[in-house]
Image (cartoon, coloured by chain):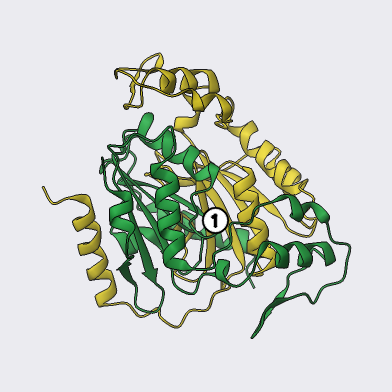
Chain colours: A yellow, B green
Amino acid sequence: MMPVLDEVLAANEAYAASFDKGDLTLPPARAFAILTCMDARLDPAKYAGLSEGDAHVIRNAGGRASDDAIRSLVISYKLLGTKEWFVIHHTDCGMEFFTNEVITGLLANSLETAALGDEGFYDVGEGPGSDAAAEIDWLTISDQAQAVVDDVIRIKEHPLVPNSIPVHGLVYDVRTGRLLDVPGAEEAGAAG
Amino acid sequence: MMPVLDEVLAANEAYAASFDKGDLTLPPARAFAILTCMDARLDPAKYAGLSEGDAHVIRNAGGRASDDAIRSLVISYKLLGTKEWFVIHHTDCGMEFFTNEVITGLLANSLETAALGDEGFYDVGEGPGSDAAAEIDWLTISDQAQAVVDDVIRIKEHPLVPNSIPVHGLVYDVRTGRLLDVPGAEEAGAAG
């Protein structure tokens, strides 16, 4: 099997060989930003129709409005001129299958990868683990639609976010590839 | 002009119409993760050769190893089985053109978008601004190669990251589409 690094570099070689995007400018041409989940099944450029140079894409576990996502969004509008933002979570998100207590317990037991069963994640590894997980808010999700609305509100209410920026909240359906409305999100994210 | 939300939903409709990835599983098929910048010119799926389902992609301003990026990486390996990570910054990154002091001053003055001139960002907007920026570490970059190495080391030394995970540090060249080696990164990120 070709090691992952070699695979990535070979794919990049092919991309660079026909690359014709070398003149794009730093600010996003379409002046918007998307905050979405790191989930491997999501390709925001494909699901939202982005070409290179179009829009900022911020991704983390869950697509959550973490302090770091808000750092990125503020840089996106204040320095690089985006005027409209999207928060896009998705169905079947891993963040729905555990809690802060569960991941803290798993990591305290071992740093090896856990398994996912019918009742959630369980540990199969042996120690040493680490207690450092207890100090982290893992930003897990108990209700997907509510999490989208919560994140839209957290962004809208941040003191560094101007009221003029609309924030659209949507859910991506990993089974159909479709972006779905979230009740209450559009009202919560409307520009003032 | 079609509003951005309508454009995104129309593009998504086209994507969903020929969608055939509805059976992908939650854990990334190729068991790796990429941490990279939100910059609009970067399309990690294209520059690294990813199909839907292959790999986690985490993005923030700068592609920095923030606490939130590390939260995401730990979830990526502990719960979803990734075994190898990439930190990929890029040339002409906006994070090289300002400092904590500059963005704090700009945001204190106004929440409107600043402009970029030969000597860096300057404010063109009128207040009110906010002093909340002073409490944030904006994770700016003064030396791009060193920032990659610093981020690789920060990840490798985190108590929740097992030593078995290799972390590759690279820079994406926005003029050529090419991934470039970073001196010292491979040694810093080697699996123990």
Residue found at x 46% / y 24%: A97
Front in this rendered view, residue B125 or A186: B125
Front in this rendered view, residue B146 or B85: B146
Left or right of residue B113: residue B34: left
Total numbered badges shown on the rendered structure: 1
Density class for disc 1 (Cα within 10 Å; few <14, some 14-19, many ≥20) is some
Considering only vertical position in the picture, is A40 above or below B46? above
Q: Give x and y (percent) for residue B127.
A: 88, 66
Left or right of residue A89: residue B190: left
For the view shown, which residue lies furthest in the top direction?
A: A119
For the view shown, which residue lies furthest in the bottom direction?
A: B118
Q: Can the viewer see residue A92 in this picture?
A: no
Considering only vertical position in the picture, is A142 above or below A183? above
Considering only vertical position in the picture, is A133 above or below B60? above
Q: Give x and y (percent) for residue B105.
A: 78, 66
| The quadrant where residue A124 appears | top left
Residue matched to label 1 = B9
Residue found at x 54% / y 31%: A138
| The quadrant where residue B116 appears | bottom right
Q: Give x and y (percent) for residue A108.
A: 43, 19
Quadrant into which the C terminus of chain A falls: bottom right
Left or right of residue B168: residue A97: right
Chain ID of residue with mark 1: B
**Secondary structure of residue under mark 1:** helix
Left or right of residue A162: residue A138: left
For badge 1, the amino acid type reads Leu
| The quadrant where residue B131 appears | bottom right
Q: Can the viewer see residue B90 in this picture?
A: yes
Q: Give x and y (percent) for residue B102.
A: 71, 68
